[in-house]
Image (cartoon, rainbow, N blue to C red):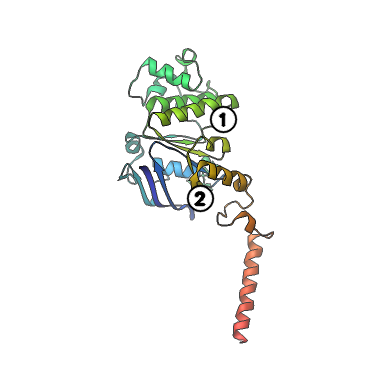
Amino acid sequence: MTILSLEHVHLVREGRHILNDLSMDIWQGHVHAIIGPNGAGKSTIANTIMGLTGYRDITGDIRFEGESITNLSVSERAKRGITLVFQEPARFEGLPVMSFVLAGAREKTRAVFDKSLIMVGLDPDKYRSRAVDRTLSGGERKRIELASVYAMQPRLVIMDEPDSGVDIDSIPYIFEVIQELRQSGTTVMLITHSPEVLRQADHAFLVCAGRLVDKGSMQRMYNYFNGRCVPCSHVGCPDRELEEIPAFTNLEMQAGLEAANVRADKEVRNG
Ligand SMILES: Nc1ncnc2c1ncn2[C@@H]1O[C@H](COP(=O)(O)OP(=O)(O)OP(=O)(O)O)[C@@H](O)[C@H]1O
Ligand SMILES: [Mg+2]
């Protein structure tokens, strides 16, 4: 069953189509990945689904649990159970870690706090009396943010680059949270350009230049992404398959096409 759908979404910024006729169905209870190179539009998709300022002025429709949410505010979307974990961990300077983690939780108990911190590999006793401030490392902040999502058990969580700024030893904890959330019925959208994060998903959407290039099972998209997008030799040209790419630039290709048109024109005129 579809929990969230994007229907022909366009977002124009500074004369550019950052999202270009984007349609996607997110199935309830699954882990989906949105993959694509730097600048593909992945964070923009997350911000647009969440309805952040600067990302509200779209054409097309976004539907959540059967209803359009396109005109709803961020807080109205959050109330419906949509949450976003930012690429850069948010700063809520000074808020006690415990209040932060339990902010969206139905049960605001010490037991839920402890369980959520343990889930992300942090010792609850060490963080209970600390604040979300500059004394936390970037990785700790990211993990505490994930602990808050675990405590919240949202309907849909979008995680923008959940592994960014996290040390390699902590990444398995993040993956565990993703799988635990799925087990408890949360739908997860992972935004990533990491093949390892992609492996946590069931399905993936490949985005390039704000457009959907392909979608399918994680394994198929993993092979596609690893083979063709990492590294990418034609950034921002999602229509061009790797084997089709000639050894000349777009400008040269354009010039070649124009020359061919002139030739064809002459041939027609000369009979
Ligand atoms: N509010 C905005 N105004 C103008 N341009 C924007 C805005 N938001 C995003 N962009 C542009 O849209 C494109 C997509 O950006 P986005 O942050 O979504 O990419 P991304 O796929 O998340 O990349 P990365 O992997 O580097 O995080 C970029 O060229 C970016 O500069
Ligand atoms: Mg991004």
The front one of 106 and 26 is 26
The front one of 155 and 183 is 183
Please identify the quarter of the rendering in which residue 64 is found. Answer: top left
Q: Is residue 204 above or below residue 114?
A: below
Q: Secondary structure at mark 1?
A: loop
Residue at left 64%, top 51%? 233
Q: Secondary structure at mark 2?
A: strand
Asked if one can make out residue 14 in the rendered structure from this viewpoint, the answer is no
Q: How many marks?
A: 2
- Mark 2 nearby-residue class (10 Å; few <14, some 14–19, many ≥20): few
Dot 1 and dot 2 residues touching (CB under 8 Å): no
The front one of 25 and 42 is 25
User: Which label belongs to residue 165?
Assistant: 1
**In the image: residue 97, left or right of residue 242:** left
Q: Position of residue 3 (x, y in %)?
A: 36, 41
Q: Position of residue 208 (x, y in %)?
A: 53, 50
Q: How many angstroms separate mark 1 from mark 2 (CA)?
A: 28 Å
Task: Report which residue position mark 2 lands on.
Answer: 214
Q: Position of residue 214 (x, y in %)?
A: 50, 50
The kind of residue tagged 2 is Asp
The kind of residue tagged 1 is Gly
- Mark 1 nearby-residue class (10 Å; few <14, some 14–19, many ≥20): some
User: Which label belongs to residue 45?
Assistant: none
Task: Confirm if mark 2 falls within 8 A of ligand 1.
Answer: no
- Nearer to us of marks 1 and 2 is 2
Q: Is residue 185 above or below residue 32?
A: above
Q: In the displayed image of the protein, which residue is found farthest to the right?
A: 247
